[in-house]
Amino acid sequence: MNNDSKPTENNSGINQPMTPQEVDPQQKLEHLKELEKGGLTANPGDRIDASMSLEEKAKQVAVDAPDITGDHITVPTYFVVETPEGEEKALHHVKDAEEISDMIRMARLDENGNQVWR
């Protein structure tokens, strides 16, 4: 397994599942039921529900399955980020992909591991 797949916790204490073991078993069952129905145009976890709280979005998983190499991968539906202004946002891994890339380019760490914004 890739060592980059460690649980992430931001300053507010929001944890996002990054390994199969961290995914809520109830969420796994719901995804499996949706997949068994068939006729889906997207992964069950990719659905956007605007009424969800930041914490709920942080726990939503888009993919929790083995990939073609046999490694089990877990992809959060939303990536919770903190903007340079200190605002926390949940960015959808597909819909907000460009903004996620922009955030990655802006956020850098200094030699002490502190986040520095460009």
Image (cartoon, rainbow, N blue to C red):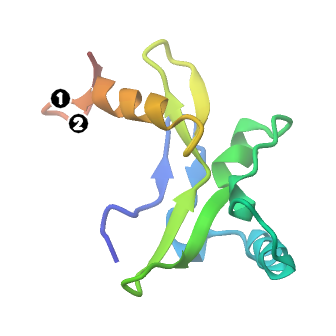
Q: Is residue 92 above or below residue 103?
A: below
Q: Could you say which disc has been placed on residue 113 in the image?
A: 2
Q: Is residue 92 above or below residue 83?
A: below
Q: Secondary structure at mark 2?
A: loop
Q: Residue at x 62, y 51 (%)?
A: 77
Q: Secondary structure at mark 1?
A: loop
Q: Residue at x 49, y 38 (%)?
A: 97
Q: In the rendered view of the protein, which quadrant contains the N terminus?
A: bottom left
Q: Point out the residue furthest to the left here.
A: 111
Coordinates of residue 82 in the picture (x, y in percent): 49, 27
Coordinates of residue 36 in the picture (x, y in percent): 82, 82
Residue annotated with mark 1: 110
Q: Is residue 24 left or right of residue 82?
A: right
Coordinates of residue 52 in the picture (x, y in percent): 81, 40
Instruction: Give the mark count.
Output: 2
Amino acid bearing label 1: Asp
